[in-house]
Image (tube, helix red, strand yellow):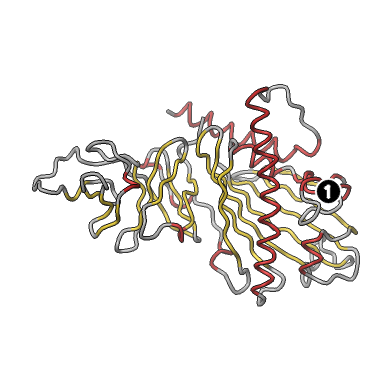
Amino acid sequence: MFIRNIWYIAGWAKEVGEQPLARRICNEAIVLFRNKDGVVGALADRCCHRGAPLSLGTVVGGGLECGYHGMVFDAAGACVSIPGQEKIPASARVTSYPLVEKDEFIWIWMGDAEKADVSKIVDYPYNNDYKNWPHKHGFYHIKSNYKLLVDNLMDLSHLGYVHKTTIGGDPDTHVNAKMDAKKTEQGVKITRWMPNCNPPPTYANGVKFNGKVDRWQEFEFLPPGNVIQWSGAVDVGQGAFEEGGSREGGFSLRVFHGVTPETESTCLYFWCVSNGYRQDDPQATQDLYDDVSKAFREDQAVIEAQQRCLDETGEDDLVSIVHDRGRVQMRRVIDDLITHETLSA
C-alpha cells in the first residue's frame, strides 16, 4: 500500500525537456513533459481517445500531442485541440497531477489534489549552491520495494561490510559507533559518531589527514522516502562532536536520497552528492561522485538480492538488532501515515 497524500520525487528537472518522459509512480503510469513556455506538467500516460500512451507523443505549442491521432492536452489535462474537429467535448481530458519544480527536483502529488500543500515539500537549498556545494545527480531503477532501500540508509552498520573500498572502511568502526536515533516532527534522525578511527578510502583520497580522524554521520528521514545526509571527518582533537567544536578543514559531503515507489517490488532512486571539501576542484567532485556511485551500486546488488529472497520467504520472522533503532522508527512513521490516510478515506 502506498501513501498518496504526500509529495514524491518524479524526476530531476533536467530530465524533462523536449521529449515526454514516461514514469510509473505508486503503480500509476505517468507522463512528464515541459511545454514550450518551460512549465512542467504530469498527466496519466493514457490518451482518453483510444488509450494510447501519451509518452509516445510530442510536445507542441499547445501542450502534449498524442502520437496516435494528434489530440493535444495541456498541463491541466484538458484537450485543447482535436485535428479536424472544432468542438471539444468536456469529457476529452486526462488525469493531471499537481507538480512543483524546486531545488532541481520535480515533485508530484499522487493523492487528492485539493490537499496538495506546497509548504510540505522537502527543502534542500544545497542543490542551489554550486559554489559551496558543487554536486552531481544520479538516478537508479531499483528492483526492490522502496522501504528496503530506505532501510539500508537508516542502518549504516552495513558500510564496513558492503563498501570496504570506498565510503565504508573498517567494519568495527561502524558497529561500535556511538549512535543516537530520535523522532523528529516529521520523521526520524540518526546521528553516529566514530571517534579516533582510520579514514575510509574515499575520505583519505579526498583530503590529506594527519592520521586518525573523528568521523560523523547524520541521516534525517523525511517521509515517504527521502533521506538527507551530512557525513564527514576531521583530524582528531578539533571537537567535532562537541558544541562549539570545529568540523572545518576536513572531509565533508552531503547527499540527498530520494526514493519513490514505482510498484510494490520496484522503486526509483534519485540521489545527488555534494563536495564540501575541495569545492574549487571539479575533479574532486567527479571523483566523489564516482566513488559514491560505486557504493550505491553495491547497495543495489544487495537490496535486489534481498528482495528476491523475501519474495520467497516473506519478512514476518526477521529479527531486529541494536543497529535497527533508526530503521524501526522509520518504518513506524510510514505505517502511521498509511493508517491515518486509510482511516481518513
Q: Quadrant of the C terminus?
A: top left
| Disc 1: CA contacts within 10 A as few (<14), some (14-19) or many (>=20) | many
Picture mark count: 1
Question: Residue at left 33%, top 44%?
Answer: 96
Q: Say if 34 sits above or below 28 in the image.
A: below
Q: Residue at x 35, y 47 (%)?
A: 55
Rendered image quadrant of residue 28: top left
Kindly tell me whether residue 40 is visible in this rendering: no
The percent position of residue 111, horizontal first and vertical second, equals 41, 38
Which residue is painted at 72% across and 41% down in the image? 326
Q: Nearer the viewer, residue 281 or 251?
A: 281
Residue named by callout 1:
174
Residue 196, compared with residue 246, is above or below; it is above
What kind of element bears circle 1? helix
Q: Is residue 87 left or right of residue 29?
A: left
Question: Which picture quadrant has residue 325?
Answer: top right
Residue 233 placement (x, y as % from top left): 80, 63
The amino acid on which the numbered mark 1 sits, given as a three-letter code, is His
From this viewpoint, is residue 300 visible? yes
Quarter of the image where one finds residue 54: top left
Residue 129 lies, in percent from the top left, at: 57, 69
What residue is drawn where x is 36% and y is 48%?
Answer: 42
282 sits left or right of 325 in the view = left
Task: Please identify the residue farthest to the bottom as the structure is shown.
Answer: 280
